[in-house]
Image: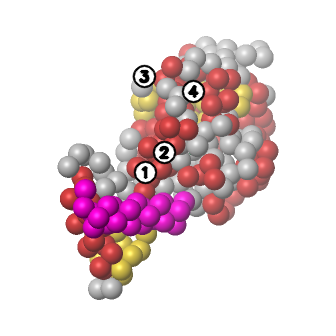
Amino acid sequence: MSDFNEQYNKLIDEVRVLVKKHARGRPPSISVSEETAALLTALGTALSGTTHESASASVADVQDKREQKIEVEVRTLEEENNEMTTPVDISSLTTLDEIAQVITACTRCPLHETRNKAVPGEGSPQAPLVFVGEAPGASEDAKGRPFVGRSGNLLTDIIEKGMKLPRADVFICNVVKCRPPENRVPSPDEVRICEPYLLRQLEILKPQVICALGAVAAQTLLKTTDPIFKLRGLWHDYHGIPCRVTYHPAYLLRNPVDKKKAWEDIQEIMKFMQDQGTVFPSS
Ligand code: URA
Ligand code: SF4
């Protein structure tokens, strides 16, 4: 390799490290100058030869002549790195405890860098009903338990006062297991990287019903971009399991008028379980 090429490649490696550092914990795009965008794009094409997405940074979303927002595939790089540090085949995990242990040590996506505690989920392994939320908030991140803050209190009331069930009889978890900084909505990449844990949890639990709390949970489970008003009020299918969608408790705290509709959703679930003769662990 010529001296020039060697130095060029070294420089590029350094840029990639900087880009990765810059992008940690943020959405998967960064802003760079037009010249840098062009350089990275050209380089991506030159280096890619393979199908390496990270090398083929694609230019998108031109906001300003000087500042182009490019989709540098930093997440792909993160993933590659992290697959090395978390070399676990999630589909081979066989118990909820095993999954929880792996989640607790997980570094597959950048959310691990800003979390205090990962929040795998909790409840009965025999739960016939599973609630799926979006992602942990501050209280959950501090405790390592799902739905233990203000939204959690409302969800607990829905389960215990509304459905007359002990909270420990259901299973409660989230799509994404670590708190996104400032409680932002998890990015599509974060959801994609974390989703195999949820999938495996539900495969092991095999509940009779799933209740998706809010748009992120519903859209992730049902692989749709339909808004919540279209998804509520119907039975959906998640890998053969009936799934009902309702408002997220955090939304209900901000919009208490919709509590009535949420209660209708919950009553549909209760009716279904009654028809099925569902038995709860502690009954
Ligand atoms: N909101 C969620 O979606 N999940 C939690 O665990 C807490 C708040
Ligand atoms: Fe791992 Fe999910 Fe936490 Fe990301 S959010 S670090 S994928 S457990």
Residue 19 on the magenta span: yes
Are discs 1 and 2 less than 8 Å apart at CB? yes
Q: Is 22 placed above or below 88 here?
A: below
Callout 4, which amino acid?
Answer: Gln
From this viewpoint, is residue 16 visible?
Answer: yes
Spatial distance from mark 4 to mark 3, Cα to Cα?
A: 15 Å
Mark 1: few/some/many CA within 10 Å (<14, 14-19, 20+): some
Q: Earlier in the sequence, mark 4 or mark 3?
A: 4
Nearest to N terminus: mark 3 or mark 1: 1
Image location (x, y in percent) of residue 74 = 42, 57
Task: Let me know if residue 174 is in the magenta part.
Answer: no
Q: Position of residue 72 (x, y in %)?
A: 37, 62
Q: Residue at x 72, y 28 (%)?
A: 123
Horizontal side of 268 relative to 137 (left or right) equals left
Separation of residues labelled 4 and 2 (CA atoms): 25 Å
* Real-space CA distance between mark 3 and mark 2, rounded to the nearest whole angstrom: 34 Å
Whether ligand 2 has any atom under 8 Å from the Cβ at mark 4 is answered as no
Report helix, strand or loop for mark 4.
helix
Q: Earlier in the sequence, mark 4 or mark 2?
A: 2
Residue that mark 2 sits on: 81
Residue placed under numbered mark 4 in the picture: 201
Name the residue type under label 2: Asn
Q: Is label 3 in contact with label 1 (beta carbons under 8 Å)?
A: no
Q: Residues within 10 Å of mark 4 (few under 14, many from 20)?
A: many
- The quadrant of the image that shows the N terminus is bottom left
Ligand 2 within 8 Å, label 2 CB:
no
What is the number of callouts on the image? Answer: 4
Asked whether 221 or 167 is in front, the reply is 221
Residue that badge 1 annotates: 77
Report whether 272 appears left or right of 50.
right
